[in-house]
Image (cartoon, helix red, strand yellow):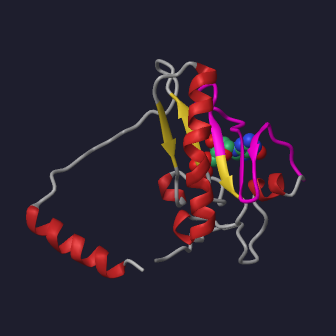
Amino acid sequence: MSTDDGARGDDTGAPKTIFGKILDGELPCHRIYEDEHVLAFLDIFPLSPGHVLVIPKERKAFLHELSDDAAAAIGRVLPRLARAVMRTTGATAYNVLQNNGAAAHQAVFHVHFHIIPKHGDRGLGIAWHPSALAGGDAVALVERIREELE
Ligand code: DGP
């Protein structure tokens, strides 16, 4: 899969990203949680109160580049962090968002998961334009994706 998406800021020798600088203590953050593999902190441009970012310490630009260990570490803490954000903000709905690539609205090229509480109109706005899944296409697509699975 192509990852030629401009400044990557991962461990390929590309310039350090903002999140890399936060990990290295060169920039401050409102830290919520940290372990060996993961850091979580408040988003500096929140869509709603309680908007949190969860990042791996592994410096990769895109989700599909993460090691299984880094991915598992994030998966382990995401629900705990979501529970804490929900309890703290009183939100009863939230989105978890993870963008990959500038075309998909990624601005910082270090993997990050957003936890975004929904408070009335505040939170993530989604433009969703579904189409109908055609039976024949689905069968062929499933086959091809399965072949690509490592
Ligand atoms: P994305 O579009 O998925 O790449 O989101 C990047 C997010 O990062 C965006 O919601 C704003 C946030 N952000 C950008 N710079 C900083 C920063 O210096 N500190 C913090 N805490 N968040 C930042």
Q: Residue at x 27, y 44 (%)?
A: 129
Image coordinates of residue 55 in percent, x first then y, are: 67, 53
Image coordinates of residue 130 in percent, x first then y, are: 24, 46
- Residue 134 highlighted magenta (yes or no): no
The picture quadrant where one finds residue 138 is bottom left
Residue 36 vs residue 118: left or right? right
Q: Nearer the viewer, residue 112 or 108?
A: 112
Q: Residue at x 22, y 76 (%)?
A: 143
Residue 88 vs residue 103: left or right? right
Q: Residue at x 51, y 45 (%)?
A: 97
Q: Nearer the viewer, residue 29 or 81?
A: 81
What quarter of the picture does the C terminus occupy?
bottom left
Q: Is residue 102 visible?
A: yes
User: What main secondary structure does the magenta stretch of the protein show?
Assistant: loop
Image coordinates of residue 43 in percent, x first then y, are: 68, 38
In the depicted structure, whether residue 48 falls above or below residue 63: above
Bounds of the magenta segment: 26-53
Q: How many marks?
A: 0
Residue 20 vs residue 79: left or right? right
Q: Residue at x 53, y 61 (%)?
A: 101
Q: Nearer the viewer, residue 131 or 149?
A: 149
Image coordinates of residue 115 in percent, x first then y, are: 57, 39
Ligand 1 is found in the corner quadrant, namely top right
Q: Is residue 66 visible?
A: no
